[in-house]
Amino acid sequence: MTRLLSVNMEATVAVILFGVGFTMLLLHRNLIKKIMGMNIMDTAVYLFLAAKGYIDGRTAPIVVDGIQETSAYINPVPSGLVLTGIVVSVSTTALMLALTKRLYEQYGSLDLDEILILAKEEEEKRT
Amino acid sequence: MSIVQNFPFFSIILAMFSGIVSSILPGKRARNVSLIMIAATTALSFAVLCFCIRTGESYTYMMGHFPAPWGNEIRAGVLEGLTASMFGVVMFLSVLGGVNYTASDVERSKLNLFYIMIDLMLSSLLALVYTNDLFTAYVFVEINTIAGCGLIMIRQKRKSMSAAIRYMIMSQLGSGLFLIGLSMLYDVTGHLLMSPARESVARIMAGESYVIPMLVILAVISVGLAIKSGLYPFHYWIPDTYGYATPTASAVLSGLVSKGYIFLLIKIFYRVLGENFVIGSHLINVLYCFGVAGMVMGSVHAIAEKDARRMIAYSSVAQIGYIYMGIGLGTEQGMVAAVFHIFTHSITKALLFISAVGLYEVSGGRTDYHSLRGAAYRNSLAGIGFAVGSLSMVGFPMLSGFISKLLFAASALRCPGKMLPTIIVLAVSTTLNAVYFLRLVITLYSRQQGSEKDPEGEAKERKRPASGKSSWMLRLSILCLIGLNLFLGLMSRPVIQAITDGLAMFD
């Protein structure tokens, strides 16, 4: 068991990091920390992908010195997926940060529970 | 190769391109572009449906220059064509019906942004329906989330901001799980395209290796998509989100977006993991239990609501529960019933949200039960629309809700272990549905006490000048949605046949 975990060290670390990020995004009350959790979660997935695409003793799939055989290079697909994933997570992070800024301007707080209570009170005042 | 085979790609790219063009157009033009585009993509999807029914088989369409195991693919069959056309129709009618309300809810200078979000939403929904590649599905899931969040927050009033952040957080949890599930699946199978991945999964299953990883993949992907579609224990973002967005956004989000994720889940079950593995694992029972719990708890929450919009939103929780219950039955009939209920619910929910717009218009824009009293007399067509939608949700014969309940019950009868709980919960949930929907319908059709109604109501009506002038759009969309509901209820046989054929084509 321990041996398997240490052989797949990158995957183990990635899953632990994913758990940390997921829990932060789910349970933390502070919005900024939630966004940080989201980023940790996404980065963990990229670590997982990059580790799985790496083949021991090979190099990045960029042709130098005229070597053309595929056996010289690592699997390029996971790297491509990581790039796409980074683009996606940057845009969602930007959107979340913009929303957080608007919420802070509106309610003067970064605490999601407090914001929800304030929003509810505002709603009750209207009706 | 027939020209029709290009249409799925055309419809996705058309929707995305009109979103880009709309960014430099003024609001009204953007709206017209959006409406024309939705109509055009619906026609294209319908052509795909007819083509697939005629040829009787599905086809894959190569994107780019790399053939199957490496490149990207689109796949179209009867079920994809049918779902895409249905999504297009519902989207068109929701946008058309909510036009005036959208124009008054959204800042003038930002109106085109709303329609950009609608365009992107449709494009991502179509891509989710048609794609044959798992990572493309993930990217479009994210586009869908961002567009959905935009649709919620563009109202910028009251609780819509906090609703948007909640929606975003829950969606991110869901897509994070979905992404790690995909990565693990890629790790185990070495493929991202659905068909080669399916072959690898079959080989792995036959060799009985990777038992636990496959189970984890199944669980993580199902839970991720269940969070995003708002299955019961993960439903807390639903009432605020659907309750405080503009009616068009609510109709689109509850009628289409959650269905897009469920459709993707069904597709992954059938086309990647294989239905034998999915049914053989016990996870399907978990989905079943959550679905059953959602059917009851969603209705209980809805009964407690005093606001019409939030009540309709909570009823979505119950209806999503029905769909997951159908998937959880683990039989072919159960799946057919679930897909049929996807159509029923998207049409009926759009009808409810849109006809409720007509009722708020004549009640001074207020949405609580008290103000809506007697609203059906002030706007008779909207009242009829709302009554039809409610009866359909309750399961009144002739309407589509009846057929889906019948299908659920019939499929439960062939499922020995789950027969009794399914039938009991169906009965309980139907009764609860009747309690809250009919209570609102009766409120709508009860005369207001005294004569204080008219002066105030009419004064407020005049404040919304657009409502009198062009409410033909609202009327038309209510009429069409009622017609569709009756169509699904009275002539369900061809639709059920198409769903059965489409599911058979998934293999």
Image (spheres, coloured by chain):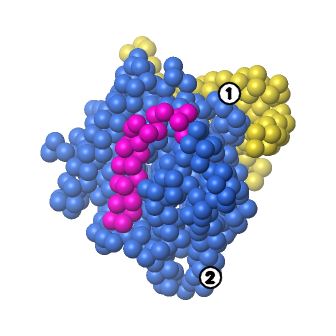
Chain colours: A yellow, B blue
Q: Identify the secondary structure beneath mark 2.
A: helix
Residue B475 counted in the magenta span: yes
Q: CA distance from mark 1 to mark 2?
A: 44 Å
Pointer 1 and pointer 2: residues touching (CB < 8 Å)? no
> Which stretch did the figure color magenta?
B461-488
Q: Amino acid at mark 1?
A: Leu
Residue located farthest toward the front when viewing the structure as drawn = B451
> Does B312 appear above or below B182?
below
Q: Where is mark 2, residue-wise?
A: B424
In front of the other: B213 or A122: A122
Front-most of residues B8 and B278: B8
Q: Residue at x 66, y 23 (%)?
A: A98
Q: Do marks 1 and 2 share a subunit?
A: no
Compare residues A87 and A14 and report the one nearer the observer: A87
Secondary element at image label 1? helix
Left or right of B189 on screen, residue B434 = right
Dot 2 alpha-carbon crowd within 10 angstroms: few under 14, some 14 to 19, many 20 or more: few
